[in-house]
Amino acid sequence: MNPATLIILSLLLVSWPIQPTPSHAFDSIFSFGDSYIDTGNINLLGKKFSDPPYSDNSPYGQTFFHRPSGRYSDGRLIVDFLAEEFGLPYLKPYLDKKGSFRQGANFAVDGATALDPTFLKQHNLTVASNSLRTTISSQLQWFKELKPSLCQTTKDCRDYFGRSLFIVGLIEERDYLEMQSSDLNMMMSCAPTIVRIIGGTIKELLDQGARTVVVPGIIPMGCLPAILTDFKFHGDNSSFDLKTGCVETYNKLSRYHNSLLLKAVKELRVKYPHAKIIFADIYKPVMNFVRFPQRYGFTSRPLIVCCGKGGEYNFLSFAMCGSPHVTACQNPSTYLNWDGLRLTETAYRYITKSWLRGPYADPPILDARTK
């Protein structure tokens, strides 16, 4: 993409507001993933299942909700902006059993993975956290448990889910981060299995009646301050890209994973020609934020964490956001990264716009919506 085109796109992303779509194209939203779209399931599971930082502590949620809301950001997430676009309420976490889920449910859980812990053990891969909370398979099982309360017959379910928007992804990143391995080849060897699991989940949902499915890729992991801090700590400066400041080996892994995922999406489109299966690219917009931060209103040092404490990137694993005496920056809207692993509301807003109208979704969600 040439620089002139990129400037035009960045201006459009900054200027486009998110407003309810008059047609109310979708009656409900169902999402599967990890902390990038978790709206509170991890808190309902309890802290014994999670690692710091904890999203039920301040200053999480300070920008929009003005209180911790179960979201790992200062405000709204991609799923929240999608709900606003289609005139739907913010998605309730599935584990909050109160009320109706007729307008959608969020099955995403912080720390969720595609790979089962058994797979990691069988391949002698050490896991970073003490316990893996859920997998995409367990989230799919929750969906199946909820299904009888939403529709009964095959026809009813196809009609109901045919008017729903499904989001499946923003989960695989954790699979790679969980592997305490600097062996790029080892992590890349797991990518086909991870993508196969995601593809299988999408297939099951399509068989259940889903007709519009958004399949996000993963972000440039080498630009995460948590990764950057770890590489700096071990003195591995040779892995850094001098132009972006990111760890190229991890970004290479992200690109490889996304290429496999896009291939899987194209194969599913052939098998399910009646469905709209949307590949949503998060890698490219985040890299644009890193390369040209000031075009989007971000600080000139986009790899610095807003909510953190200490170190070159304002990130230390023992003093993470939500911990005592850790505060947030004065203006989160000028930061790309919120807590070292996740993004700010402003970043999520720009990404959502690029998925709704393009250019970073194929096809754009608004072009694929149910008529």
Image (tube, rainbow, N blue to C red):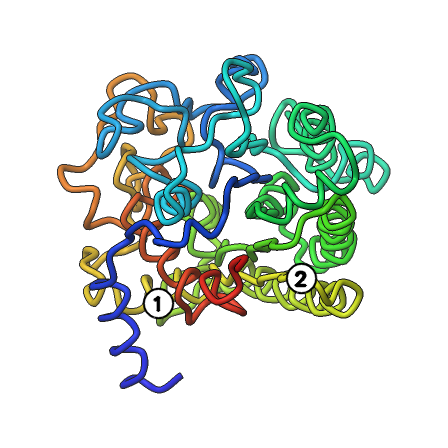
Q: Residue at x 70, y 58 (%)?
A: 188
* Amino acid type of the residue tagged 2 in the rendering: Leu
Seen from the viewer's position, the closer of residues 13 and 25 is 25
Query: Looking at the figure, which quarter contains the N terminus?
Result: bottom left
Quarter occupied by residue 318: top left
Between tags 1 and 2, which lies in front? 2
Residue 255 is situated, as x and y percent measured from the top left of the image, at 58, 66
Residue 3 is situated, as x and y percent measured from the top left of the image, at 30, 84
Q: CA distance from mark 1 to mark 2?
A: 21 Å
Q: Earlier in the sequence, mark 1 or mark 2?
A: 2
- Total numbered labels placed on residues in the image: 2
Q: Against 55, is 98 above or below?
A: above
Q: Residues within 10 Å of mark 1 (few under 14, many from 20)?
A: some
Q: Residue at x 34, y 20 (%)?
A: 323
Marker disc for residue 288: 1
Quarter occupied by residue 290: bottom left
Q: Against 129, is 329 above or below?
A: below
Q: Residues within 10 Å of mark 2 (few under 14, many from 20)?
A: many
The residue beneath circle 2 is 261
Q: Against 265, is 204 above or below?
A: above
Seen from the viewer's position, the closer of residues 47 and 185 is 47
